[in-house]
Image (cartoon, rainbow, N blue to C red):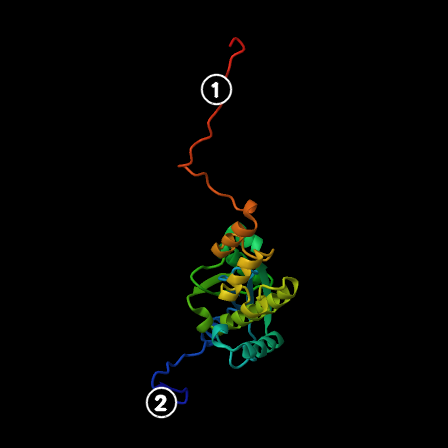
Amino acid sequence: MIREKSGRKINLPKGVIAVTPPSFRRERALIKRGVWPVAGCDEAGRGPLAGPVVAAAVVLDPKRVPKGIDDSKRLTAERREELFEEICATASFSVAFASPARIDRDNVLRASLWALKRAVEGLPETPKHVFVDGRDRLDTACDCEAVIGGDGIVVSVAAASIIAKVTRDRLMCALAEECPGYGFESHKGYSVPEHLEALDRLGPSAHHRSFFAPVVAAREKHQPWTVKRDADLFEPAAETAPLISAAE
């Protein structure tokens, strides 16, 4: 059983878990203290084998917060697209990308944090406070607050999750035209059986992340010269031919 804002009680069907949508409560508390603008930021694409991480930062208009904003993972693709358009029309936002090359160089966590910082710095007006989804704060000029599960708690972060997710999905559909056969348009680079089969059949594309395990396996099969192997300590050393002196 849950209770509406009006106080009316609602009985849910057995087995259904009530999920409270994200709210503007934390942003409103900061506004009352004179802290504004307040941004939310989130990323999409840490887990896939291919494509960039896409980070977004959003400053919602307190008077025009679109209804229905939620964690992008709890929305259908159609609803995400609708909210994406509404957020873009009513809020300030910025998007940044961490390429597969940066992910290979820095690791996916560091590359994600780099992209999130870039998204915040790209906002039209520098925020005074930033909420970021996850455990890690960003090295920003303003105050930054990490909120675990923030995309399901803070509506500005949820809005950023929608902007990041829709932007990345559209990008992966574009990459599918550039690199046909991998199915990027359907799985968006995640390690589903269809993608793993394509990797094994075609080998990695330029958009794959080189050091993710399934990609390494595909590189070993199709591009073995690109895989650096550590020396085998148990392999016998090559014998050196004996030196023969001129006197002999």
Q: Assess disc 1: are there few (<14), some (14-19) or many (≥20) residues with their C-alpha within 10 Å of its C-alpha.
A: few
User: Which residue type carries mark 1?
Assistant: Pro
- Residue furthest to the right in view is 178
Residue 132 position (above or below residue 104): below
Please give the residue where the numbered disc 2 appears in the rendered image.
11
Q: Is residue 117 visible?
A: no
84 vs 16, left or right, is: right
Quarter residue 53 falls in: bottom right
**Label tally:** 2
| Residue sitting at x 45%, y 38% | 231
Q: Position of residue 248 (x, y in %)?
A: 51, 10
- Residue furthest to the front in view is 248
For marks 1 and 2, give the one nearer the viewer: 1
Quadrant, the N terminus:
bottom left
- Check if mark 1's residue and mark 2's residue have beta carbons within 8 Å: no
Kindly identify which numbered label has been placed on residue 242.
1
Residue 210 position (above or below residue 143): above
Q: Position of residue 178 (x, y in %)?
A: 65, 62
Q: Is residue 55 visible?
A: yes
